[in-house]
Amino acid sequence: MLFNSFQFILLVCVTFFIYYTPAMRKIQPALLIAASFIFYASNQPVLLLLLIFSITVNTIASYLVFFGNVKFRKSYAVAGVCLNLLTLAFFKYSPLFGKTFFSPDQAVGHFLTMIPLPIGISFFTFQGITLMVDSFRSEKVIEFQKLKTGSFPNYFMNTALFISFFPQLVAGPIVKAHDFIPQIKIKYMKDINWNHCFKSLVLGYFLKMVIADNLKDQTFWIAFPYFQGNATSTILTMLFGYSIQIFSDFAGYSLIAIGVAGLFSYNLPKNFHYPYISKSLSEFWTRWHISLSNFLKEYLYFPLGGNRKGEKRTYINLMVVMVLGGFWHGAAWSYAVWGTFHGAGLATERFFRNRLSIPKNTGSNAIKMIAVFTFVTFAWLLFKLPEFNHFIQLMITLPRNIDMIINVQVVLQVAVYSLPIILYHLIYLYRNKIPVLYMNLMEPAIYGFMLFMIITNSGSPNEFIYFQF
């Protein structure tokens, strides 16, 4: 069920009006769970059983951590984390395992390659992991103690809502248990921050429907074998457009999720913060997919030792985290290469940062931003071309097609739909030089323009890119 579909808008509206009906206040969590199940089942009905299985496993395991024998708390938590990881591995990586180690003619290989990929499994299993870890650490999180109160059915209800909450169920932002569960209480319409919801929804739908959905018609031609018939300059232009598209697509989804959650008086964390103005890769990962970056840092990088065990171990930890982060994105070796590429970049950057003193001025900052954007953009090729041999073919095609004539239409289309994202980043970058009064006067016109473009110039509907992860 796409966010820009009539079915989704209807689901949100119906749920919203029932949710805030005074007679329904006491069952608000149950209403959201029911809406979440409808939302998830609309795509793959039979795989709703997997979501229910995940909820049940995480509820029982975390409940045992809280109320079971104190001697076995760690064992329960480890078992819960392992069950989450095994579920993710079975459904997401069995096809890759089958293609790599078995012939498609063999029964085992055929079975493994036919296992479906449940939408959103990477996200809701990670949230299950945060529940297990947070329940084990609960003595350090005072607000999370409220989980220990109430009956098992109430505990089950809270866990079910946390894992299945439909605005962010299939593509995040990844929410931590100790941030979300304390928000579960009776909600009133007066709790809604209408201004925040409106801005998030309008900007989110603009990024997705106007920018990403129009750019996809141009970046489609990067796919194999179409890029072989395009000039080098055209391919590079399309790659630039894909970098803008993937930002607009995923940031758009996150903003819509935040806006819809806000309508039900739940706060989701910011997931993007102007990532293409980053002056370093480490800064980029504090601005791009922030909820995943924080998850990997808190639940993997720090437990591995972070940067506390010496320089060499820090580089190893960075590589491990980024390679696993790459594999999290998809069951293809190209994603592992993408993670390795970023891990090597972060390690190299850290090595030279500790040894070189680079002057900070406008010129050097601009060079850094361009360098980081170029690095990140080339890495996106591994997302666009998940078959690694296709990526290699494109690398061969680039120097070979350098004398071919550029496709002017593609360049113009990419330029037109990339311009709003460039301005979006530049306005933030130079926000301190723009008078506040001027920005306040311009804001209604900007949001009015985005609404007009959504109505008149949306591209053909398409799934969000991160649905495949």
Image: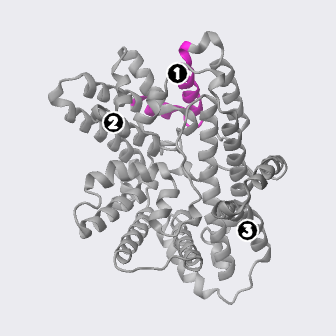
Disc 2 to disc 1, C-alpha distance: 21 Å
For residue 219, what is the image quadrant? bottom right
Q: Residue at x 60, y 40 (%)?
A: 257
**Picture quarter with the N terminus:** top right
Decide if residue 266 is in sight here.
yes
- The amino acid type of the residue labelled 2 equals Asp
Query: Secondary structure beneath disc 1?
Result: helix
Residue wearing tag 2: 134
Q: Which residues are magenta?
A: 26-53
Q: Is residue 97 left or right of residue 191?
A: left
Q: Locate residue 301, reporting x and y percent.
A: 32, 55
- For marks 2 and 1, the one nearer the N-term is 1
Disc 2 to disc 3, C-alpha distance: 44 Å
- For marks 2 and 3, the one nearer the N-term is 2
Tag 3: Cα neighbours inside 10 Å, few (<14), some, or many (≥20)?
A: many
- The amino acid type of the residue labelled 3 equals Val
Query: Secondary structure beneath disc 3?
Result: helix
Residue wearing tag 3: 414
Q: Main secondary structure of the magenta part?
A: helix
Q: Foreground mark, 2 or 1?
A: 2
Residue 234 vertical placement versus 290 (above, below): below
Residue wearing tag 1: 29
Q: Residue at x 35, y 31 (%)?
A: 58
Q: Foreground mark, 3 or 1?
A: 1
Residue 124 vertical placement versus 109 (above, below): above
- The amino acid type of the residue labelled 1 equals Pro
Tag 2: Cα neighbours inside 10 Å, few (<14), some, or many (≥20)?
A: some
Q: Which residue extends farthest left?
A: 71
